[in-house]
Amino acid sequence: MEPKRCSWVTSDPLYQQYHDQEWGIPVHDNRKLFEMLCLEGAQAGLSWITVLKKRENYRVAFRGFDPWQMADFDETIITELLENDGIIRHRGKIEAFIANAKAYLQMHDEGEDFSEFLWSFNGVDEPAAAMSKALKKKGFKFVGATTCYAFMQAAGMVDDHEAECFKRSSLQTR
């Protein structure tokens, strides 16, 4: 018998695996959080399954979400990315990834830990709006409040597994 999952999870095995093994589990690794934030931005206006199905292609195209490499992407690489049908070919989103890499590196150079920065919004009033505002101030793109909230859900900063979902009870005991 299939476990009871959140109602947004389809019968797609990739979606089920994502829900069961990733979504809502607390993440503190800087590079993983950077990847997750970028991919949530890629989702803007689309369904998450669209991005999820292309995630491995994104990892290849964006050099494993290595911000040191991504910050050096130039117009030639942007043009190549716009021709890559394995990712969402949206210039604004691609350029946002590059801007985000530069903003990430600026934080790093200033001795600011990305994970600590992001987790500092957990528990504040309207955390997604506060995170969005702070990220934009640092130069991040495609990080509106809705995107930040979806990121917070995915990174385990909030537990939005539905009451009937088998993951809700397992996460509450952590």
Image (cartoon, grey):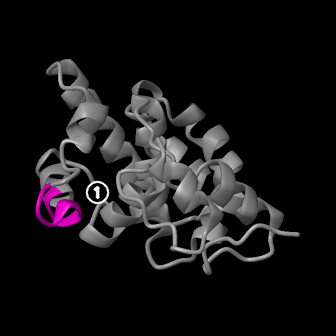
Q: Quadrant of residue 6?
A: bottom right
* Residue 128 drawn in magenta: yes
- Within-10-Å neighbours for mark 1: few <14, some 14–19, many 20+: many
Residue 110 sits above or below residue 91 on the image: above
* Residue 88 drawn in magenta: no
Q: Report whether 72 appears left or right of 108.
A: right
- Residue 100 position in % (x across, y down): 32, 44
Residue 42 sits above or below residue 34 on the image: below
Residue at numbered disc 1 = 141
The residue shown at (51%, 47%) is 25
Q: Who is closer to the viewer here, 49 or 167?
A: 167
Q: Quadrant of the N terminus?
A: bottom right
* Amino acid type at image mark 1: Lys
The residue shown at (39%, 64%) is 92
- Residue 86 position in % (x across, y down): 71, 57
Please give the range of residues in magenta.
124-130
- Residue 5 position in % (x across, y down): 67, 71
The residue shown at (74%, 56%) is 17
Q: Quadrant of residue 105?
A: top left
Q: Who is closer to the viewer here, 58 or 164?
A: 164
- Residue 49 position in % (x across, y down): 65, 69
Residue 162 sits above or below residue 65 on the image: below
Q: Report whether 11 appears left or right of 66.
A: right
